[in-house]
Structures are given as structure tokens and as C-alpha cells.
Amino acid sequence: MERFDLAIIGGGAAAFAAAMKANELGAKTLMVNNNAVGIGGTCVNVGCLPTKHLLHAGEIINVSNNNKFAGIKSDAKSDFSELIKEKDQLVSKLREEKYAKVLKDLEKVTFIEGNAKFKSKQEIEIGHNVFEADKFIIATGSSTYVPPIKGLETIDHFLTNIEALSLKRKPDSVVILGGGALGVEFAQMFSRFGTKVCLLQSAPRLVPREEPELAGLLQKYLEEEGIEICTSVEVKSVRQKGKEKIITATVNGKEREYSGEELLISTGRNANTKELNLGVLGVKLGKRGEVLVNAEMQAAENIWAAGDVKGEPMLETVAAKEGRIAATNALAKSTGEKKRMDYFVVPHAVFTDPQLAGVGLTDEEAINRGVKCRCNTLPFELVPKAQAIKDTRGAIKMVIDNSTKKVLGIHILSSMAAELIHEAAFIVKGGLTVYDVIDTLHVFPTMSEAIKIAAQSFTRDVSKMSCCVE
């Protein structure tokens, strides 16, 4: 029986970050991945990268067919199957370059493909083989949560993000259950490729974790593109009639039916812990099967967890940071180094068009923390660059501590919001005040100038201000 200093179960961002740190520290490491979605995990195979590739293709189609410049005449036609082929080529290339090749360079890491489960607190079983390790990191990711809907088992099939990204033919129509980030991204993507889309959301609004003003604007823009959106929906049952999936639901107490050629479920994620036999470890699990950890990513005496498997926030960058912290702390006995995870400054984005991004506290979160906050929301009509490029969709909301004037959160709905949010992250992380932001020169004209204008709105009426004023 071979023994290792550290065993990592998983093959995504958290697992790779942990393996790279362990390799740096010279630890003899075992890495096990079951290849359910491929080496590299969800993000590179069936998540972040392929969806953003296809969303950008949809954006090009939309801009071409609906451009706002009178002097430009254009008309874009798309080939769905060809776009999927291009997506597959991108995934294959990045999986090889960013994961398979990286793995080969980790001389202290032994990689095995297979399903691992715990036999004891020191042993894992992979097929007929047993391996021992002093420490373990669980980084098995997550998969789509499929709600218990009556009749779901009777239809010929339904889609999750995995199947939706593997379709060879563009569906004529699709009903999407779930209005979080994944739901709205797929809704806009399919709609722009020419599919009739209906999105059903159980909450009163889309992307409910985001600022309500921005979420409301996003819904308005999606509906203007022809996407049917229904909120406060309680799905009762599903049945099949010919090729159509029929969804029966109640909306504000009234029964309604929705139908589509495809049914896409995007109602959240479950941690992949079911097959690991975690009962032998004494770790605690949450309601979605997530491994509960402390700030050092530790779940039990010799067990750490990182990435989606430990629950929200389920983000690629967060998973990588957690993986590195978990490996650092698991091997701390030899290094003396200890790290803690800080979730206060975690920038995130929804890659619709316009994009929705945020960092720090929302208005509601600040109030719940007892902060006497002040919030200003400004439309992008006030940003000169937005007018120059004829895209004034969106708004920026800044949350500040009204006593100290420190910026606690910045939330943006606009073109390129996912790029703009990094300046916001530095502002929140650095504990800067609105005066610090105002005093910082910005290039003119730029979309990022919106952050400075938002800061200025706490000291003056920015609608009556000339360009570039301090």
C-alpha cells in the first residue's frame, strides 16, 4: 500500500491550486479525478469558458443585427453547429494547455483517474486499490441540483449546463427553470442564436443576490430582446406532448402552462459528496451536501475541503484561492505557515449583455451588519464614454459608510462591467473613501470613469457637472 503526505480528490481549479502548492512544498501528493466532466473540472469544460465563448458569439450577432450607428449597415447569420465545434476546440486546447501539461510538470504529484471513496480517516479506495495519506483535501466540485418535480422522470430528457453545451442542433424553443447567473446567461445565449426562450424564476426577481435596481434593469433588457420572463413561479409538474415539454406552474396563485422543445434546469448546485463515504470521517455536511469548513478550509482533524464542494461562493477564482490555502494549512506542520480565507472582497460577474458585476457589501448586507450606510445609484447616461459608444444601458450603485465615507461595495450593470469591477475590488479591499476615489485621476473618456462619477455623486449633483471635473 503506497502512502502519501497529501491526497487531493478532484481535478478542477481547487484541486490544481492545491496540487501546485503541495508540489512547491515538496510534499508527496496523490491527485485523483473521476473525469465526470474532464480534467480541469466544470469551469474549463462545461462552465465559465465555453459559456463565455458562446455568449460573445451571441453578442456579435446582436450588435451586427441591432447596431445603433446610422452609418453602419450589417446583417449577421450564424451556424449553431459550427459555433459548438469552435467551442469544443477551445475547450480541448485549454484543457490540454492549462491542466494536462501543468500536471505533467508537477514532479511530486501522482495522478490517477478514477472514483475515490474513503475507507478510513487515513485511506481512500480507488477501484480495487487502497492508498494511504496523512492529510486529505476534498475538491470534488458540484453538479446541477435537480428539484423533485412531479413527472420529470417521464419526459424523454432534460438539459443541464453539460447537455446544453453539447447540443448539435439549435432548439426551436427552450424553457429554463432558474433565474440565477447560469439561467440568465443561457437564456440570452439561446435567444440570440434564434431560439424562443421562456425563463421561469421562483424568486420575485432575477439574480436575487444582486442589487434589486440592477437586477430589475437586467430583466427589462432581456425582455426587450424577446425573452419571456416570469418570476414568483412555483413549478408543479412536467409532462411531454410529442416533442414538447409542458411545464405546469402557479404564478401569483394562478395556474399556467409553458412549453418548449427543450427544458433546461439551472436551479442551483449540489456538492459532489454523495459517493465519497464521508461518514467515516466525522465531517459535517450542509443541506446541499457541502462540506462545512472553518476559515482555514479545515473540516476535520486531517481533512480540508476547497472549491464548490464546500458551498458558496462557487466561483473559479475563489476555488483556486481556497485550494491553495487548504494545501498550505494541510502541510503547515512542516512549514509553520497558516492561512485564512477572507470572503469580504470577492468580485463576481454575470456575463449577460450588459454584464452585471459586484464586489463588497450590497445595500441590504450593510444594513444587516448595522452599518449606517448611504447608497447612490447612477445611470450610465451620465458617463460620457457610454454616450460615445451609444450604449448607455445600465447603472452603477455605490454603498458607503456614511460616517467614515469608506466605500463598502460597488455594483455595476453595464457593458464591460466584469472588467470594470477590478478597480472596484481594489477600492473596497484598500478601505478607500469616496474622497480617495475622487482624487484619483481616470482616463477620459472611459467606462471605468463611472466609478469616479459615482463617488462624486456623494459630494455634488453630477448631472450638472462638466467632463473631467475633480
Image (cartoon, helix red, strand yellow):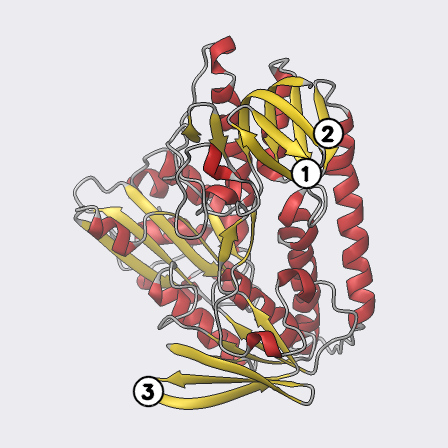
Disc 3: CA contacts within 10 A as few (<14), some (14-19) or many (>=20)? few
Residue 323 position in % (x across, y down): 54, 32
Q: Label 3, label 2: how many angstroms apart (C-alpha)?
A: 54 Å
Residue 201 position in % (x across, y down): 44, 73
Q: Earlier in the sequence, mark 2 or mark 1?
A: 1
**In the image, is residue 275 above or below residue 245?**
above
Which residue in the structure is indicated by mark 1? 33
The residue lying at 56 percent from left, 37 percent from top is 139
The residue type indicated by label 2 comes to Phe
The residue lying at 78 percent from left, 76 percent from top is 77
Q: Circle 2 — which element?
A: strand
Q: Nearer the viewer, residue 111 or 79?
A: 111
The residue type indicated by label 3 comes to Gly
Residue 20 position in % (x across, y down): 64, 25
Which residue in the structure is indicated by mark 3? 253
Which residue in the structure is indicated by mark 2? 111
Q: Earlier in the sequence, mark 3 or mark 2?
A: 2
Q: Nearer the viewer, residue 421 or 122?
A: 122
Q: Circle 1 — which element?
A: strand
Q: Note whether residue 445 is visible.
A: no
CB-based contact (under 8 Å), mark 3 and mark 2: no
From the viewer's perspective, is the residue at label 3 or at label 2 nearer? 2
Q: Circle 3 — which element?
A: loop
Q: Label 1, label 3: how many angstroms apart (C-alpha)?
A: 46 Å
Q: Quadrant of the N terminus?
A: top right
Left or right: 368, with 104 as reference point: left
CB-based contact (under 8 Å), mark 2 and mark 1: yes
